[in-house]
Amino acid sequence: MIHRTVRMILFSALLMVAVATVLAAQGLEYIQTNYTKHEYQIVMRDGKKLHTAVYAPKDASRSYPIMLERTPYGVPPYGPDRLPARLGPSELFAREGFIFAYQDVRGRYMSEGEWEEVRPYQATKHRPDEADESTDTWDTIDWLVKNVPNNNGKVGMWGISYPGFYVTAGMIDAHPALKAASPQSPVTDYFMGDDSYHNGAFMLAANFTFYLSFAERKGGPAPSSNSPRINLGTPDGYDLLLGMGSLENSNTLYYHNENPYWNMNFQHTVYDSFWQARSIAQFLKKVGPAVLAVGGWFDAEDLAGPLNVFRTIEKNAAQPDNHIVMGPWSHGGYSRGDGDRLGNLYFVEKTGAFYRESIEFPFFMAHLKGGDVAPLPKAYVFETGSNRWRKEDVWPPKDATPVSFYLSTQGKLSPEAEPNAAKSFDEYLSNPNRPVPYLGSIAMGMTSDYMTEDQRFAAERPDVLVYQSEALTEDMTVAGPVSVRLNVSTTGTDSDFVVKLIDVYPGDYVNPMPPPQPAGGAGGAQAQRPAQSAVRMGGYQQLVRGEPFRGKFRNSFEKPEPFVPGKTATIQYVMPDVCHTFKKGHRIMVQVQSSWFPLIDRNPQKFVEIPKAKPSDFQKATERVYHTSAVSLLVEKRK
């Protein structure tokens, strides 16, 4: 039986690879038949030339809008006779007919100049040749609309993750031809909730693996090439990074001081002028193009980015045609696949396909080609738990009101604080040399679906506090940011506090069975259902939202302060939005812990410069969480 199951899994995997290969070949054939490629070196205002690949329809009988992506990751395949298997945000665009322009940003691959990590926007230009990413976008668009034949004078921009940052930058002081912009999972503020730091805690697992392959360019312009794979000797990131010790040992063992982008994270461990200048959303005060910000509720890298962009534009009334889409996706998951599942969760609807066909494509069509296209709502969000799309004219919804849940005695999550709550507490011993893992399984970096993971493995540890409600008697929908207020003390002089909001499934919950998948093969072999997950969903503790907070930043992210051992202190912070229904019969759980490794770096629990901490600095600490602590959720009224 085991051998048969293994054969089925191998067959399914091979089938998926074969289907993907066929689809890619079909895409390449279509593009070769219908598009012509040109490569240009577009001159910027300071004389630097940026490499730009342009793919134009061979049918010159009509004009087309231009879709532009600017990226630090390369624009292969290089060479005027080499074409990719896909153009645009989805295959719908190439078949509709657009001109596509892909650009290596300044200092990357085939473009001239020096690259700078999240290059700051210069609000005041002192010279006419002073350049930033906003001016580079302006100069690029100006050249494209004036020099590429058969364009209709309208430009759209899109980009996921780092390319999403360049879209946001291009929206500032935008060229008048830029009519529609979609920053998707954009890097927006590296220190405040995006890739590098979350509430002062360094996102170790993601950055350690990322910067091993994202390095400084040596020499002048050159095409992208495959980065050599580094053999770390183990698939176990927890064991590897725990054994590494202090973060500065990463250069001794792995980086050898050859990657300045990795080092910048340890040269700027507070929210100083370096990070503040790179917070791009603060400059969204006058936005010309229509905006479609896109993100995923389970985006492990840039969940905060699209919410930040959307809210800033709304606050500044910078552009009334401003929209946000949030779906049940990992980082960039909306751009590929059906989007009907992630990790152990099954969403029933094919959310990715729906987004590409019914939201993204119509948005660009409306602003670049016109026609009869239904207007988008202000917010198009997917409600997890109940698994349905929602259209909202404001986000968060107007009828969502804050409801507090207190961390009470005997592991109860209560709607009211108990008498004498200020004097009662729970405590645990936090050992930075045996940190709480962020996963119950082995992985090297940060997994793309950890934000859906079962938390039962953590609830069993003595250094994790667990609070849960009674079983709900009716559905409860939470829509908006999650606020945390902790009253704590520690025997150390610094500590992290991680808060996780969790949906606890009933014990008799039955694993959902997705619909049959076509087996294919000669003669139309019988369709096979996918093998049932090894995880049983009865009693599943689904992570809904979780964030760390480095305690020394409780009063200021610019000027950290040590704890006074044994003295009560208050930590308040806001976790990114959710849109989730806790179903009838489910329970709401909150877990509190002081490590989350190697998702975030270890806090020695001593007030030191953490990247330079010595082995002797890592000390055990007793953490107390007082029963005046609470999590506040924006709960919608039942209709």
Image (spheres, helix red, strand yellow):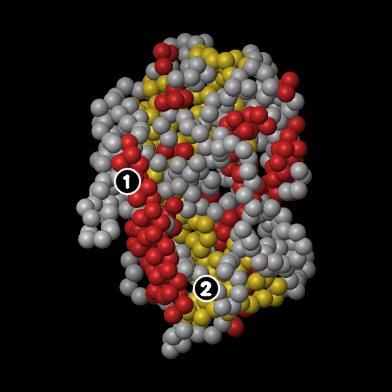
The image shows residue 586, relative to residue 285, as above or below, that is above
Residue at the spot 54% in from the left edge and 69% down from the top edge: 68
Distance (Cα) linking label 1 and label 2: 35 Å
Amino acid marked by disc 1:
Met
Circle 2 SS class: loop
> Is residue 521 left or right of 460 when viewed as pictured?
left
What x and y, as percent, mark residue 314?
49, 54
> Is residue 343 left or right of 265 when viewed as pictured?
left
Residue at the spot 61% in from the left edge and 47% down from the top edge: 210
Closer to the camera in the image, 493 or 485: 493
**Among the 4 quarters of the image, the one containing residue 602:** top right
Q: Is residue 508 something that shows in the picture? A: yes
Q: Which residue is mark 1?
A: 8
What x and y, as percent, mark residue 42?
66, 76
Q: Is residue 355 something that shows in the picture? A: no
| Contact (Cβ within 8 Å) of mark 1 with mark 2 | no
What x and y, as percent, mark residue 569?
60, 21
Which label number is shown at residue 83? 2
Closer to the camera in the image, 12 or 321: 12
Amino acid marked by disc 2:
Leu
What x and y, as percent, mark residue 97?
42, 77
